[in-house]
Amino acid sequence: MPSDSALDPENRTLYGEILRAPQGYEVDQALATTYSLDFETALVIPATMAFQAAENRAQVLDTPLALLDGLERLAERLAIFCEAGRISAQPRAANRLTALLEDTVTEVLAPHGGAFHPKIWVLRFVPLSGTGPALLRLAILSRNLTTDRSWDLSLTLDGEVSAETQAANAPLSTLLRALPGMARGRPTPARNRRIADALARDLDRTVWTSLPDGARRLRFAVNGLGQPPFRPRVGNALGIVSPFLSPDALFQLTKGLPTDECWLLSRGEELARIPPEVLSRFGKVMVLDDLAETEDGDETEGADSIALGLHAKVFVTERYARPQSTTELTVGSGNATVAALLNGSNVEVFATLSGPSSRMGQVPDHVAPERLGRFLRPWPPPDTLPEPDPAQLAEARLELTRRKLAGTNLTLRCSLTEDGRIGLTLTARPKVALPDKQRIEIWPLTLGQNHAVILSEPLGREGIALGFFALADVTRWLGLRLTDAESGTEMVFSLGATLKDLPEARTAEILRTIIENREAFLRYIRLLLGDAQAAGHLILKGGGKSDFLGFAGFADDAPILEEMVRSLSGDGRRLHDIERLMARLGDARGVDGEPVIPPRFTAMWEVFRELLPKEPRRG
């Protein structure tokens, strides 16, 4: 078996590597799917993609200009699809910038009642020179778009977009085309539909240029779209890594296999729920050792750099007779559960790599002491099955309420007051009845939980007033807290609503909190005109929130005109970024009361706009 086992927790691929463009290329379009999401990750991703550097996450989050620059450069090219009701409601940094993700993130629900659970990235890269083939990168992950530091796995493939159809990629392109139709409440924005459709067309024609060592064949599968569900093909032996388990799924997977040819790795609390007669079908039942900590690679110091817990999902199967057997590794989003493998209710993605066992290892090899086994220990079964935990029962009740709210069409109506503040009224269709012995609190996400309003009567067309707020704090994102009255168990999350009657100046107000005056505007124009990677290093060198414009290298008399002419003589990409910024800022005024955009720049820009080449269509 190769020394660099795919299941070794120290061989994880990090997001910085997945998102980094090949030399001489840039990101043209990107799409991600995830079960859960936090806004910090969603804000950092465009900056990581734009700057082509795996910077310290905390440093990026503490530098609003870095977040803004990443969003301005790449938000129009990025689409994220996430399970409704699974967004964190506690953004730590640059809260107002989450409003600029309103069109980037689309909340969806699985079409057959399960969970929307796939975790993939599809990225298209185009050559900076304008000539050469488009490249596609596919990453199939076990991790979500969150700060979770559990051990997880990923498969990353690079390929070229060819002229011929590649039938093996059809399950993935079918998923991408289905994504816009899964949106809840608010329809999928048109730009996200275009991204999904364009990348699906590319997937239809992509030839993967290399497979991991030892693998000779690659197959994809997607569950939850109405077709018969996929599950791994089991031959002579089986190994399972799965944080969540169902007795029926384990029984079906091990049917007809000898006990000594099966092993199972899961979490202790999950194994305790499985009947002993099902676990007895496995010769080895294991958990991660409490001391098995692996580097997360987040480039931070101390405990934050340690990966803890289990989130990886993989099925290792062996077919045909030894020693000429074939090993198959199936990785992806699906656990060993009924919803993921048997009834097809969850939307899941799988990739199966197959090759000779002499190269990919026999099933027992993968948990040998010199491989994954060094991180594992046998699981000691309890003497009796545990009693139901009251907190878990309460959480299950809250989960039913969360899913009901996630399937509700929520609308936020804006009304302008005489003092320029915005009144927000929340309505729902169909009506949301108050759950028995539960409390629902709702607040505008950017303001925090201290602005929560308790829902005291059913929420319907008549609505509930959330309060009056500054325009820059208005967003479609809502924070919600569900509380079980008997146990005190809480569940906090975010949902998106449809914004009605939103003043057009909202985005300008948000940008004004970052671009505070004319000096800041001109410095930011220099950033947009410059190389993204160099700009990223300069921004991040400048420090945190209070001094993010204090970096070196941009004199006040910088020759902006020369750089604009240089961009105009090229493809004009940077000038299109300026055009979007100008439209967003409009007539915004800075903290000094003066227009943020200098009148002389506005006059100069009118000349450039007349000469600006048409922006090429993506996809």
Image (cartoon, rainbow, N blue to C red):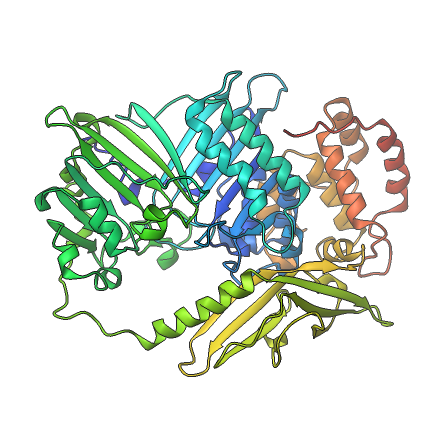
Rendered-image quadrant of the C terminus: top right
Residue 395 against residue 267 in the figure, above or below: below
483 or 438, which is in the foreground? 438
209 or 472, which is in the foreground? 209
Residue 118: % across, % down: 44, 45
Q: Quadrant of residue 17?
A: top left
Asked whether residue 424 is in view, the answer is yes
118 or 212, which is in the foreground? 118
Q: Quadrant of residue 593?
A: bottom right
Rendered-image quadrant of the N terminus: top left
Residue 458: % across, % down: 62, 76
At a point 51% along the width and 42% down the height, the residue shown is 32
Residue 45 against residue 37 in the figure, above or below: above
At a point 70% along the width and 55% down the height, the residue shown is 514
Residue 486: % across, % down: 41, 83
Residue 128 against residue 581 in the figure, above or below: above
**From this viewpoint, which residue is outermost toward the bottom?**
486
Q: Is residue 216 left or right of residue 44?
A: left
